[in-house]
Amino acid sequence: MSSVSVRDISLNFGAIRVLQDLNLEVEEGEFLVLLGPSGCGKSTLLNCIAGLLDVSDGQIFIKGRNVTWQEPKDRGIGMVFQSYALYPQMSVEGNLSFGLRNQGMARDKVRERVDRAAKMLQIENLLARKPAQLSGGQRQRVAIGRALVRDAEVFLFDEPLSNLDAKLRSELRVEIKRLHQKLTNTMIYVTHDQIEALTLADRIAVMKGGVIQQLDVPHTIYNRPRNLYVAGFIGSPSMNFLDGEIVAQDGGLVFRLGSHEVPLQDYVADIDLRPAANAVFGVRPEHVEVFQGDADGSKPTFPAVVDLEEPMGADSLVWMTLEGQQLSARVEASRRFRRGDEVRVAFNLPMTSVFDRQTEDRM
């Protein structure tokens, strides 16, 4: 049985359709990430699951119960907001225990749950402080703790780390992942940050315009994107896109890129690959090999000219021009390139993607 089941839901704000006949099944104990840019509908979907927004059509089930018209407090959820939403006049302990005390829970039981959450989040020494005395990371831990004490069946996270600096985001990302491993509760997490999605998720739902473009495990989302939108949104730096055509040649197919041809015999296709007059060759920078001299001859290579080198610490990003189109490649930081250098490039073909320019779908 699914932990959360979203069935054919739609949400309209007047004449504007925000969610369109959306279906989603979240398995028991799964960490699902809703990923997409601002305005794609990910937070709206989360708020519908939470009961903060009423759907225009469709149904929502949590643990097999139809909760479509139930109040948020009756849905068995714990929610963590982007803005922390802490009571400034209360201590950390007061914020953690407020909901439980309002439910009339026994004092010793409240104390037990607060202590458990504080220990899990390593905030035991902060219980007497007010929110104004806490750092951003500490406040977010308290906000997460307030959801944890509810002992909810499903936890919902609405961009909880977006207000934090890069170092704190990285630290709390690890803590949230460890938290899920300890609790094994179902978690649905909204973010526009692809790194958060790739590192945290069991599965990722990439959204655009209120529609899920692809729902799969991070490895598949990254290496076999379903369409141009997913391919371009996932990955930092982004996937290279080279315009060309697929043509038949000597009993096989090649991708023609200007005056050069990339053999496609090792390409891993999603459908039967066919000739196409307007196609896109997609390759991630780490799957582009750059030769500063003679290549080893084991694979086809193509001439390119270096435009600039972008040092990134552990490695560097080299930007080149290939047949009048921009191409980037990840290389070892120890290698050096100068503007105007003539190099040759090769592609790791099984890791590439070819898209139909008209439908934008992967072929």
Image: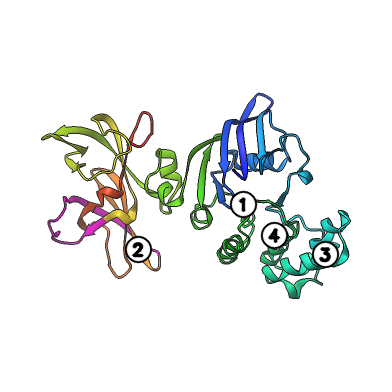
* Relative side of 310 to 337, left or right: right
Q: Which residues are magenta?
A: 289-312
Q: CA distance from mark 3 to mark 4?
A: 19 Å
Circle nearer the viewer, 2 or 3: 3
Outermost residue toward the left in this view = 250
Residue 109: numbered disc = 3
* Relative side of 61 to 297, left or right: right
x, y percent for residue 126: 76, 72
Asked which quadrant contains residue 114, the reply is bottom right
- Amino acid on which the number 2 mark rests in the picture: Ser
Q: CA distance from mark 1 to mark 4?
A: 14 Å
x, y percent for residue 355: 33, 36
Viewer-proximal residue among 51 and 280:
51
Circle nearer the viewer, 1 or 4: 1
Identify the residue at horizontal 66%, vertical 38% (top origin). Answer: 61
- The first of marks 3 and 4 along the sequence is 3
- Amino acid on which the number 4 mark rests in the picture: Ile
- Amino acid on which the number 1 mark rests in the picture: Thr
For numbered disc 1, what is the local secondary structure? Answer: strand
Q: Mark 2 = which residue? A: 316
| Quadrant (top left, top right, bottom left, bottom right) of the C terminus | top left
Q: Mark 4 = which residue? A: 144
